[in-house]
Image (cartoon, helix red, strand yellow):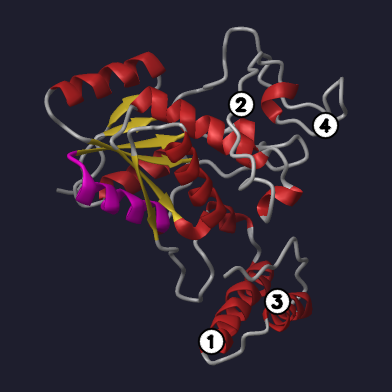
Amino acid sequence: MANKDPLMITDKDEMRKWSRSMRAQGKTIGLVPTMGYLHEGHLSLIQESHKQTHLTVVSIYINPGQFSPTEDLSTYPSDLLGDIQKLKSVPGGVDVVFNPKNLYDYGNNDNGCGVGLDQEGGKVVSCVETGGMGHETWVRVERLEKDLCGKSRPVFFRGVATIVTKLFNIVEPDVAVFGKKDYQQWRIIKRMVRDLDFGIKVIGTELARDDDGLAKSSRNARLSPDDRQKALSISKSLFKAKFAAENGQNDCQELRNAVIQAIHEAGGKIDYAEVRL
């Protein structure tokens, strides 16, 4: 049934109380963690949760712990009312939207995001630490977080693993659904759940793309028409490399170089390009 109004919960104790009440009734709960500004990719995660559980919770929370002060926390797109309408349009809807104000608020923060170095070791830190929130405990998946995206975003996966752990402890789901667009993130969450013995099934769904091939992303809303055309070089070069590999090209360096060249020619800048078997 579409147009189902979800229960809005902002308090973590109330969220936990709801989940425990539902589980006492024999209901299973699926969690779809998001940072909002939802698109069709997010909605497909909800549909997968419907297949797995009786009830679905969607969290909408822009997590400051995964942003360094030089990144786009302050400009990350947000539209809660629009998100609610999108959630109501999903067949079957969602049961709860968990939209906390600040999951790192222990009563002593200024909610800011200042400079990005700690005062002791000169290490890059997150907006949680520079905001004076008093949060000191972090979850790390030490090997998997270091490579690929982790090279240029040293606080990102630490922040993701920590906030997902917090959400798991608050919502207490049976199933959690993530998109494989953020493939490294999905693998890190799966490893964290295994290593820390969470009783949660982690499901990954396939990447969703727009008709022109661009991977769906909340940040796409910030692309100019010209930038969007340039961004298409990413999917085009990856599909071309995939086709070449499926047809006998087994030189990983040549495949990688072809992707890098195509993106550079389109005016893009490479963070990393890797071929993993």
Q: For mark 1, what is the residue?
A: 243
Q: Residues within 10 Å of mark 1 (few under 14, many from 20)?
A: few
- Image quadrant holding the C terminus, namely bottom right
The kind of residue tagged 1 is Phe
* Residue 14 spot, x, y in % from top left: 33, 16
* Residue 3 spot, x, y in % from top left: 21, 45
Measured along the vertical axis of the image, is residue 10 above or below residue 156?
above
Q: Quadrant of residue 271?
A: bottom right
- In the image, what residue occupies the spot 19% across and 47% down? 92
Q: Is residue 207 left or right of residue 5?
A: right
Q: Which mark is residue 138?
A: 2
- Say whether marks 3 and 1 touch (CB < 8 Å): no
Q: Residues within 10 Å of mark 2 (few under 14, many from 20)?
A: few
The answer to whether residue 33 is seen in the rendering is yes
In the picture as drawn, the residue positioned furthest to the top comes out as 107
What stretch of residues is rendered in magenta?
A: 41-54
Q: Is residue 166 left or right of residue 277?
A: left
Q: For mark 4, what is the residue?
A: 123
* Residue 226 spot, x, y in % from top left: 68, 71
Q: Residues within 10 Å of mark 3 (few under 14, many from 20)?
A: some
User: 6 or 181, which lies in front?
Assistant: 181
Indicate the secondary structure of the residue bearing disc 2. Answer: loop
- Say whether marks 3 and 2 touch (CB < 8 Å): no
Q: Quadrant of residue 221?
A: bottom right
Indicate the secondary structure of the residue bearing disc 1. Answer: helix
> N-terminal of the two: label 1 or label 4?
4
Indicate the secondary structure of the residue bearing disc 4. Answer: loop
